Structures are given as C-alpha cells and as structure tokens.
Image: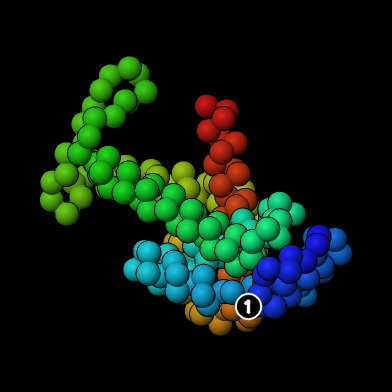
Amino acid sequence: MDVESHLSSKAQYDIQLVTRAVEKHDQAAYAELLDRYKESVYFLLLKMVNNKDDAEDLTIEAFGKAFKNIAQYTPNYAFSTWLFRIATNNCIDFIRKKRTVTLSLDRTFNNGEGSEMTMDVRSETPDPEETMIRKQKNVLMRSLVDKLKPRYRTLIELRYFQELSYEEIAERLDLPLGTVKAQLFRSREFLYNIIRNQQERI
C-alpha cells in the first residue's frame, strides 16, 4: 500500500497502521487505530442519535465493520474519512430502521396468510394480548440466545435482559471495558447470524 504524499502526516501514519493490520494481522495496529478514533467516532454518532448507549453500540459496530473490510481501504483519501463514512452510513441505517419500527405501528401489515391487518396504538399500558405477544417474543429471543457460547450468552443476558451498562458488566465479569464492548459486538454478530439462519429455514 503506497503512502499518498497529498495526505497529512497523521493520515500517512494511519496508512502504516492499516498496512500492518492487513499484511501482518498486527493486533496492536488495530488497537492503535481504535484508540486514535474511538472518541471522535463516538461523539460524531452521539450528535446523530442523541443517546449515549446507542452511540456506544454504533461506535463498536462501526469499528467492527471497518476492521472486517479494512483490506478494501485504499489510500486515495484519509483512513479517518473512510471510517467516518462507514460510521455515518451505519448510523443512518440504524435511524431508518428505528423510524420504520416506530411508524409501522399504525400501518397495515401482512399476517402471513395473505390478509392485511392493522395495529392501533392506544394506551401506553399493554393489554393482556400485547403482554402475551411480548412474552412470546422474549421466549423466542431467549431460545436464540441460548444457542450462543456461554461467554457470549452471558454478555447478551446482562446487557439486554438485565439492562446493565457496559461499566457494570465489566465490573460484574471482572473484564476490561474494551473487552466487554468488543465481545458484545461479536455476540450481536453471532446472534444476528442465528436469527438470519432461522428466518431462512422458515
């Protein structure tokens, strides 16, 4: 990978780190790239979603996607530009999905048997039917989580069922905060693959 002379010295050093990561699978290079940009990516995403937990999750996802596709980066422009584009696009997708879920509550949907149904938004207090549906969804989600390896299952359980913060999980499991965040990213990736495989079988 040739260092481009038109880039700043900081960007040129980033390219050296990327080269080490790609060609030598150098974990220290990945760690340094993460350390150099995690705060700026986090604050960029925080401005977009205005929620600290979502911004933290999206920051982990952004680095996960960037590192997974790091071999595709070319030094025609700064690594930071490429990284921020990935983070921004991923965040836009997140916002769009969240908005779709919210808006779909008062729209028609197919019940799987060819009939159109509507879901009316009424009281904030769920009726018995809604409570039963929510319980069924929780049972389904727990059955999928149970398919994960024990350490990933524990992380998902603590984060999404017990709703602990990253710091509380790190303290509970006696793990570094960075390890908790990285492993939670992997946990979600595994869980997504399980859910996708389930859907393909249906």
Location of residue 175 by image quarter: bottom right
| Residue 172 appears in the figure | no
Specify the amino acid type for callout 1.
Arg
Extreme-front residue of the structure: 6
Residue 110 placed where, x, y %? 31, 25
Location of residue 77 by image quarter: bottom right
Q: Classify 10 Å Cα crowding around label 1: few (below 14), some (14-19), many (20 and above).
A: few
Residue 43 placed where, x, y %? 45, 74
Residue 23 or residue 121, whichever sits in front: 23
Extreme-top residue of the structure: 114
Q: Which residue is painted at 71% across and 51% down in the image?
A: 72
In the drawing, does residue 36 fall left or right of residue 122? Answer: right
Q: Which residue is painted at 71% across and 56% down in the image?
A: 74
Residue 146 placed where, x, y %? 58, 51
Residue 194 or residue 139, whichever sits in front: 194
Q: Which residue is painted at 77% across and 75% down in the image?
A: 28
Regarding mark 1 in the picture, which secondary structure is present there?
helix
Q: Which residue is painted at 68% across and 58% down in the image?
A: 76
Q: Which residue is mark 1?
A: 36
Residue 89 or residue 181, whichever sits in front: 89
In the drawing, does residue 30 fall left or right of residue 158? Answer: right
In the drawing, does residue 184 fall left or right of residue 50? Answer: right
